Image (spheres, rainbow, N blue to C red):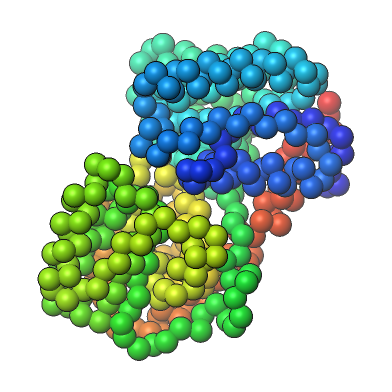
Amino acid sequence: MAPLKGHKLIIVGPSPPPAHGVAVMTLAVIEALRSTGWHIQHLDTRDPRPVEHIGKLDLRNVWLALLHLTRFVKLLASTPGAAVYVPISQGRLGFARDALFLLAARFARRRRYVHLHGGYFATFSQSADPATRWLIRVSLRGTTQAWVLTESLRGQFAGSLELGRVRVLENAVADVMAHHVGPATARSDKTPLRLLYLSNLVPEKGCVDLLEALQGLGPMVTGMELRLVGEVPRGSRGDIAQRVRALEAVGLQVEVAGVLRGAERDDAYVAADVFVYPTRYRYEGQPLVLLEAMSAGLAVVTTWHAGIPDTLREGLDGLLVAPGDTFALGEALLQLREDPELRRRLGEAARRRYEQRYRLERFDREIISLLCEDEMLS
């Protein structure tokens, strides 16, 4: 479907830093639509503080919410006829803020598109207090479309929104191999096996489970190296440092590299043999780091969680274990260390799946098509 140029959209959402899925994909939405001639107004809801402040009730967050709402009302007034896009939260305080945008847009009779970046919304809405459940229903009523990340997440809006309004829009990422010469899977079969974890180093993202799994292997960790890339929140620093020292004492080389960006981040994927992301994060959806690892042609070990099984197929594109099962995680890592052919096959399959499904060009086409469904009728 050809894009309809000149149409208007107000995009509410954060930009990085800090870099997290919602912020990165907000920029992807903006770039996809601006390149086709849409008139975009972006209300940047970024909080530059570390990610642990997201969803917390403090004076700065209250002030930011009021500031952003004021700016949003001004955008509604200055951009007549513009539709509204809001990535919605899966927690009480965050959703209360998002509901203000949705209700203002509803009062202004604008088309509203909500984008859910996780797999916890159904649990959140069903377990919420009566006032929050009422707010969810009222603010989502009449929503033009609701976008989820994978097919298995379609039911996240059950009881909150007519399921006929739900669409699937999978994530996409830039190819980390775009600036590197040679095939993505040209990796040595020799030891040491280079493991990469890349995300915020919080327990829910699986970094502690990974360290426990490696410690549980004891002397069998010989022949492995681990690189941890990401922000270490203040509350996790002592625990991470202690666990790293324990692993180094049994002969595992561990590097805590901190946050990497741009070419350095891409190089981290290219230098690795296996990407490990054993997440059990409650708000998880379709992690961008998995798509980046797939684009690098890495063998991936991750969990049966949220939209991940729709993204990586067990035994075909990656190895999946139950969230929190450190024994199974350790066994999967040993399996990949001992079987270079399995690593090669998984990495090549992951790369093919990335090329087929998770390139930015596909995302650009699909978001335009979704918006044009209703633009054609308006």
Residue at 38% of width from left, 84% of height from top? Answer: 340
**Foreground pick, 210 / 31:** 31
Count of all numbered marks drawn on residues in the image: 0
Q: Is residue 297 left or right of residue 130?
A: right
Residue at 56% of width from left, 35% of height from top? Answer: 14
Q: Is residue 371 above or below residue 60?
A: below
**Foreground pick, 217 / 10:** 10
Q: Is residue 182 left or right of residue 280?
A: right
Residue 115 position, x and y percent, is: 58, 35
The quarter of the picture where the C terminus appears is: top right
Residue at 47% of width from left, 24% of height from top? Answer: 95
**Foreground pick, 362 / 164:** 362
Residue at 73% of width from left, 26% of height from top? Answer: 83
Residue 110 position, x and y percent, is: 73, 19
Residue 25 at least partly seen: yes
Q: Is residue 210 left or right of residue 20?
A: left
Residue 339 position, x and y percent, is: 34, 83
Q: Quadrant of residue 342?
A: bottom left
Q: Is residue 365 above or below residue 273?
A: above
Residue 152 at least partly seen: no
Residue 276 position, x and y percent, is: 36, 64
